[in-house]
Protein backbone atom coordinates (compact mmCIF):
# COMPACT_ATOMS: atom_id res chain seq x y z
CA UNK A 1 0.00 0.00 0.00
CA UNK A 2 1.32 3.46 -0.86
CA UNK A 3 1.64 5.73 2.13
CA UNK A 4 -0.28 8.98 2.01
CA UNK A 5 2.71 11.29 1.86
CA UNK A 6 4.09 9.29 -1.05
CA UNK A 7 0.79 9.66 -2.87
CA UNK A 8 0.94 13.41 -2.50
CA UNK A 9 4.45 13.41 -3.89
CA UNK A 10 3.39 11.37 -6.88
CA UNK A 11 0.39 13.55 -7.53
CA UNK A 12 2.55 16.66 -7.50
CA UNK A 13 4.35 15.24 -10.48
CA UNK A 14 1.19 14.31 -12.36
CA UNK A 15 -0.73 17.42 -13.37
CA UNK A 16 -3.95 15.63 -14.23
CA UNK A 17 -4.16 13.79 -10.95
CA UNK A 18 -3.03 16.86 -9.08
CA UNK A 19 -6.32 18.34 -10.16
CA UNK A 20 -8.05 15.07 -9.43
CA UNK A 21 -6.71 15.21 -5.89
CA UNK A 22 -9.06 18.13 -5.30
CA UNK A 23 -11.98 15.86 -6.18
CA UNK A 24 -11.54 13.12 -3.59
CA UNK A 25 -9.45 10.56 -5.44
CA UNK A 26 -9.89 6.95 -4.45
CA UNK A 27 -7.14 4.43 -3.93
CA UNK A 28 -6.76 0.67 -3.87
CA UNK A 29 -3.35 -0.76 -3.11
CA UNK A 30 -0.98 0.92 -5.56
CA UNK A 31 -3.64 2.31 -7.92
CA UNK A 32 -5.33 5.70 -7.69
CA UNK A 33 -8.36 6.96 -9.60
CA UNK A 34 -9.72 10.45 -9.77
CA UNK A 35 -11.37 13.04 -11.94
CA UNK A 36 -9.32 15.42 -13.98
CA UNK A 37 -10.59 18.40 -15.86
CA UNK A 38 -9.37 20.99 -18.31
CA UNK A 39 -9.36 24.48 -16.85
CA UNK A 40 -9.93 26.05 -20.27
CA UNK A 41 -13.44 25.80 -21.84
CA UNK A 42 -14.89 23.65 -23.12
CA UNK A 43 -14.21 22.10 -19.75
CA UNK A 44 -13.87 18.32 -19.92
CA UNK A 45 -14.11 15.93 -17.00
CA UNK A 46 -12.63 12.46 -17.32
CA UNK A 47 -11.60 9.60 -15.08
CA UNK A 48 -7.91 8.79 -14.92
CA UNK A 49 -6.04 6.20 -12.97
CA UNK A 50 -2.41 6.04 -11.95
CA UNK A 51 -0.22 3.17 -10.81
CA UNK A 52 3.54 2.90 -10.42
CA UNK A 53 4.03 0.63 -13.45
CA UNK A 54 1.58 1.87 -16.05
CA UNK A 55 1.47 5.47 -14.83
CA UNK A 56 -1.53 7.46 -16.05
CA UNK A 57 -4.26 5.78 -18.07
CA UNK A 58 -7.67 7.05 -19.00
CA UNK A 59 -10.67 4.99 -17.87
CA UNK A 60 -13.83 6.89 -18.93
CA UNK A 61 -14.98 7.48 -22.49
CA UNK A 62 -16.94 10.72 -22.13
CA UNK A 63 -15.89 14.20 -21.02
CA UNK A 64 -18.51 14.52 -18.27
CA UNK A 65 -17.48 11.88 -15.75
CA UNK A 66 -16.99 12.24 -12.02
CA UNK A 67 -17.12 10.49 -8.62
CA UNK A 68 -14.65 7.71 -9.39
CA UNK A 69 -14.18 4.76 -7.05
CA UNK A 70 -11.82 1.82 -7.42
CA UNK A 71 -11.76 -1.70 -6.06
CA UNK A 72 -9.36 -4.31 -7.27
CA UNK A 73 -9.29 -3.93 -11.04
CA UNK A 74 -12.71 -2.34 -11.31
CA UNK A 75 -13.48 1.36 -11.47
CA UNK A 76 -16.98 2.85 -11.13
CA UNK A 77 -17.97 6.47 -11.78
CA UNK A 78 -20.88 8.75 -12.51
CA UNK A 79 -21.42 9.98 -16.03
CA UNK A 80 -24.04 12.41 -17.40
CA UNK A 81 -23.56 11.75 -21.07
CA UNK A 82 -27.27 10.79 -21.39
CA UNK A 83 -28.54 13.81 -19.48
CA UNK A 84 -28.94 11.93 -16.20
CA UNK A 85 -26.36 10.70 -13.70
CA UNK A 86 -25.73 7.10 -14.66
CA UNK A 87 -23.25 4.72 -13.07
CA UNK A 88 -20.55 3.28 -15.30
CA UNK A 89 -18.05 0.58 -14.60
CA UNK A 90 -14.84 -0.51 -16.34
CA UNK A 91 -12.18 -3.10 -15.73
CA UNK A 92 -8.68 -1.78 -15.70
CA UNK A 93 -6.70 -3.17 -18.62
CA UNK A 94 -4.01 -5.40 -17.17
CA UNK A 95 -1.34 -4.96 -19.80
CA UNK A 96 0.80 -1.95 -20.37
CA UNK A 97 4.27 -1.23 -21.63
CA UNK A 98 6.78 -1.79 -18.85
CA UNK A 99 4.70 -4.17 -16.74
CA UNK A 100 6.25 -7.49 -15.69
CA UNK A 101 4.82 -9.28 -18.74
CA UNK A 102 5.83 -6.52 -21.18
CA UNK A 103 9.27 -5.33 -20.10
CA UNK A 104 11.13 -2.61 -21.99
CA UNK A 105 13.29 -4.17 -24.72
CA UNK A 106 17.03 -3.65 -24.50
CA UNK A 107 17.73 -0.51 -26.53
CA UNK A 108 14.32 1.08 -25.86
CA UNK A 109 15.67 4.38 -24.61
CA UNK A 110 12.40 6.33 -24.50
CA UNK A 111 10.55 3.42 -22.87
CA UNK A 112 7.70 3.01 -25.33
CA UNK A 113 8.38 -0.74 -25.67
CA UNK A 114 9.49 -0.26 -29.28
CA UNK A 115 13.09 -0.11 -30.47
CA UNK A 116 13.05 2.15 -33.49
CA UNK A 117 14.76 5.14 -35.10
CA UNK A 118 13.73 7.43 -32.26
CA UNK A 119 15.82 5.36 -29.87
CA UNK A 120 18.70 5.43 -32.34
CA UNK A 121 18.43 9.22 -32.54
CA UNK A 122 18.57 9.50 -28.75
CA UNK A 123 21.56 7.16 -28.75
CA UNK A 124 23.32 9.25 -31.41
CA UNK A 125 22.53 12.48 -29.59
CA UNK A 126 24.33 11.23 -26.50
CA UNK A 127 27.16 9.40 -28.29
CA UNK A 128 30.47 9.54 -26.39
CA UNK A 129 28.99 11.29 -23.36
CA UNK A 130 31.22 10.26 -20.49
CA UNK A 131 30.11 10.59 -16.91
CA UNK A 132 32.67 8.20 -15.51
CA UNK A 133 34.55 9.60 -12.54
CA UNK A 134 38.06 10.58 -13.50
CA UNK A 135 40.61 7.93 -12.81
CA UNK A 136 44.07 9.44 -12.77
CA UNK A 137 46.80 6.96 -11.94
CA UNK A 138 49.87 8.64 -10.51
CA UNK A 139 53.03 6.57 -10.46
CA UNK A 140 56.49 7.54 -9.23
CA UNK A 141 59.22 5.82 -11.24
CA UNK A 142 62.86 5.44 -10.21
CA UNK A 143 65.57 5.36 -12.87
CA UNK A 144 67.59 2.15 -12.96
CA UNK A 145 71.36 1.92 -13.58
CA UNK A 146 71.13 -0.21 -16.68
CA UNK A 147 70.12 0.59 -19.35
CA UNK A 148 70.58 4.24 -18.55
CA UNK A 149 72.20 6.60 -21.04
CA UNK A 150 71.96 10.22 -22.03
CA UNK A 151 74.03 10.41 -25.19
CA UNK A 152 74.79 13.39 -27.35
CA UNK A 153 75.69 13.76 -31.00
CA UNK A 154 76.28 16.55 -33.51
CA UNK A 155 78.34 19.64 -32.90
CA UNK A 156 81.15 20.87 -35.13
CA UNK A 157 82.96 17.54 -35.03
CA UNK A 158 79.81 15.41 -34.89
CA UNK A 159 80.92 13.65 -31.76
CA UNK A 160 78.58 15.34 -29.35
CA UNK A 161 79.63 16.53 -25.94
CA UNK A 162 79.77 13.25 -24.10
CA UNK A 163 77.75 10.43 -22.59
CA UNK A 164 75.98 10.74 -19.30
CA UNK A 165 73.68 8.82 -17.00
CA UNK A 166 70.67 9.91 -14.96
CA UNK A 167 69.49 9.03 -11.49
CA UNK A 168 66.45 10.01 -9.49
CA UNK A 169 62.75 9.74 -10.12
CA UNK A 170 59.79 11.25 -11.93
CA UNK A 171 56.05 11.21 -11.44
CA UNK A 172 53.84 10.11 -14.34
CA UNK A 173 50.13 10.92 -14.32
CA UNK A 174 47.90 8.90 -16.66
CA UNK A 175 44.18 9.65 -17.03
CA UNK A 176 42.92 6.66 -18.97
CA UNK A 177 39.38 8.04 -19.21
CA UNK A 178 40.46 11.35 -20.69
CA UNK A 179 43.26 9.71 -22.69
CA UNK A 180 45.92 12.11 -21.40
CA UNK A 181 49.26 11.87 -19.63
CA UNK A 182 51.83 14.25 -18.18
CA UNK A 183 54.98 14.32 -16.06
CA UNK A 184 54.99 15.88 -12.60
CA UNK A 185 57.78 16.50 -10.13
CA UNK A 186 60.77 15.33 -12.14
CA UNK A 187 63.62 14.97 -9.65
CA UNK A 188 66.26 13.37 -11.87
CA UNK A 189 69.87 14.45 -12.00
CA UNK A 190 72.31 14.13 -14.91
CA UNK A 191 75.76 12.78 -14.02
CA UNK A 192 77.37 16.07 -15.07
CA UNK A 193 76.30 19.61 -15.80
CA UNK A 194 75.38 20.21 -19.40
CA UNK A 195 75.68 23.42 -21.37
CA UNK A 196 72.95 23.64 -23.94
CA UNK A 197 71.33 26.23 -26.18
CA UNK A 198 67.62 26.68 -26.29
CA UNK A 199 65.55 29.17 -28.24
CA UNK A 200 65.95 31.70 -25.43
CA UNK A 201 69.71 31.40 -24.97
CA UNK A 202 72.38 29.26 -23.31
CA UNK A 203 71.68 27.24 -20.20
CA UNK A 204 73.63 25.13 -17.77
CA UNK A 205 71.83 22.37 -15.93
CA UNK A 206 72.18 18.95 -14.40
CA UNK A 207 68.39 18.52 -14.32
CA UNK A 208 66.92 15.99 -16.74
CA UNK A 209 63.53 17.66 -16.33
CA UNK A 210 64.90 21.07 -17.36
CA UNK A 211 66.88 19.65 -20.27
CA UNK A 212 63.86 17.87 -21.78
CA UNK A 213 61.18 20.33 -20.60
CA UNK A 214 59.53 17.29 -19.06
CA UNK A 215 56.89 19.06 -16.99
CA UNK A 216 55.73 20.83 -20.16
CA UNK A 217 55.19 17.54 -21.96
CA UNK A 218 51.53 16.66 -22.31
CA UNK A 219 50.20 13.72 -24.27
CA UNK A 220 46.84 12.97 -25.82
CA UNK A 221 48.38 10.03 -27.64
CA UNK A 222 48.23 7.11 -25.23
CA UNK A 223 47.36 3.44 -25.45
CA UNK A 224 47.85 0.37 -23.28
CA UNK A 225 51.53 0.02 -24.13
CA UNK A 226 52.86 3.46 -25.10
CA UNK A 227 52.56 7.17 -24.40
CA UNK A 228 53.98 9.61 -26.91
CA UNK A 229 54.82 13.18 -25.95
CA UNK A 230 55.84 16.08 -28.15
CA UNK A 231 56.78 19.55 -26.94
CA UNK A 232 56.88 21.91 -29.89
CA UNK A 233 59.38 24.74 -29.59
CA UNK A 234 58.07 26.42 -32.73
CA UNK A 235 61.44 27.07 -34.36
CA UNK A 236 60.60 26.61 -38.06
CA UNK A 237 64.23 26.37 -39.21
CA UNK A 238 65.02 23.75 -36.53
CA UNK A 239 62.15 21.26 -36.42
CA UNK A 240 64.39 18.81 -34.53
CA UNK A 241 64.41 21.25 -31.63
CA UNK A 242 61.01 19.85 -30.65
CA UNK A 243 61.25 17.50 -27.70
CA UNK A 244 59.87 14.04 -28.37
CA UNK A 245 59.52 11.49 -25.61
CA UNK A 246 58.02 8.02 -25.64
CA UNK A 247 57.12 6.02 -22.56
CA UNK A 248 56.79 2.29 -23.19
CA UNK A 249 55.27 0.01 -20.59
CA UNK A 250 57.44 -3.10 -20.45
CA UNK A 251 55.00 -5.26 -18.48
CA UNK A 252 51.26 -5.60 -17.98
CA UNK A 253 51.34 -4.07 -14.52
CA UNK A 254 53.01 -0.83 -15.72
CA UNK A 255 55.71 -1.62 -13.16
CA UNK A 256 58.61 -1.00 -15.54
CA UNK A 257 58.82 1.70 -18.21
CA UNK A 258 61.35 2.66 -20.82
CA UNK A 259 61.87 6.35 -21.61
CA UNK A 260 63.21 7.22 -25.02
CA UNK A 261 63.48 10.91 -25.83
CA UNK A 262 65.38 13.30 -28.03
CA UNK A 263 65.76 16.90 -29.12
CA UNK A 264 68.42 19.05 -30.80
CA UNK A 265 69.66 22.52 -30.03
CA UNK A 266 68.08 25.15 -32.29
CA UNK A 267 71.49 26.36 -33.52
CA UNK A 268 73.71 25.34 -36.43
CA UNK A 269 76.28 22.71 -35.45
CA UNK A 270 74.29 22.26 -32.24
CA UNK A 271 74.16 19.08 -30.21
CA UNK A 272 71.39 16.54 -30.21
CA UNK A 273 70.43 14.79 -26.97
CA UNK A 274 69.11 11.23 -26.73
CA UNK A 275 67.75 9.64 -23.59
CA UNK A 276 67.23 5.89 -23.30
CA UNK A 277 66.61 4.69 -19.77
CA UNK A 278 64.50 2.25 -17.84
CA UNK A 279 62.65 3.12 -14.65
CA UNK A 280 60.76 1.02 -12.12
CA UNK A 281 57.63 2.05 -10.23
CA UNK A 282 58.33 3.13 -6.69
CA UNK A 283 54.70 3.72 -5.71
CA UNK A 284 51.15 4.08 -7.01
CA UNK A 285 48.72 6.74 -5.88
CA UNK A 286 45.20 6.75 -7.22
CA1 LIG B 1 11.60 3.27 -28.03
Image: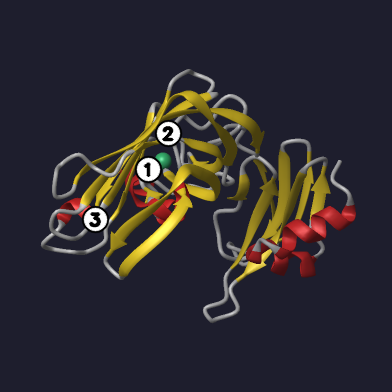
- Quadrant containing ligand 1: top left
Q: Residue at x 59, y 41 (%)?
A: 138
Q: Quadrant of the N terminus?
A: top right
Question: Which residue is nearer to you in this view: 17 or 125?
Answer: 125
Q: Which mark is residue 265?
A: 3
Q: Residues within 10 Å of mark 2 (few under 14, many from 20)?
A: some
Q: Are marks 2 and 1 in contact (CB under 8 Å)?
A: yes
> From the Cβ of disc 1, is ligand 1 less than 8 Å away?
yes
Q: Could you tell me which secondary element the residue under label 3 belongs to?
A: loop
Q: Residue furthest bottom?
A: 41
Residue at the disc numbered 1: 119
Horizontally, is 208 left or right of 55 in the view? left
Q: Of the two numbered discs 3 and 2 on the same chain, state the one appearing first in sequence.
A: 2
Question: Picture quarter containing residue 21?
Answer: bottom right
Horizontally, is 147 left or right of 5 in the view? left
> From the Cβ of disc 2, is ligand 1 less than 8 Å away?
yes
Residue 67 visible in this rendered orientation of the protein:
no
Q: Of the two numbered discs 2 and 1 on the same chain, state the one appearing first in sequence.
A: 2
Residue at the disc numbered 2: 107
Q: Residue at x 56, y 64 (%)?
A: 63
Residue 250 horizontal/vertical position (percent): 44, 20
Q: Could you tell me which secondary element the residue under label 1 belongs to?
A: helix
Amino acid sequence: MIEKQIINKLLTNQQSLLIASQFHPDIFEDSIVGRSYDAVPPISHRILMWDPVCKIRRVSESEIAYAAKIYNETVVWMDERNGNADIYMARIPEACCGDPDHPYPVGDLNKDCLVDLLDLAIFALHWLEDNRPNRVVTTIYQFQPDPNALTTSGGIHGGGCGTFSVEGCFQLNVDSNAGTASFKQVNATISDEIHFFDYDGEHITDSLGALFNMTKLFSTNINDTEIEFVFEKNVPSFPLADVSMKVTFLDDTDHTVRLVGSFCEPVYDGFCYHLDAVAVAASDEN
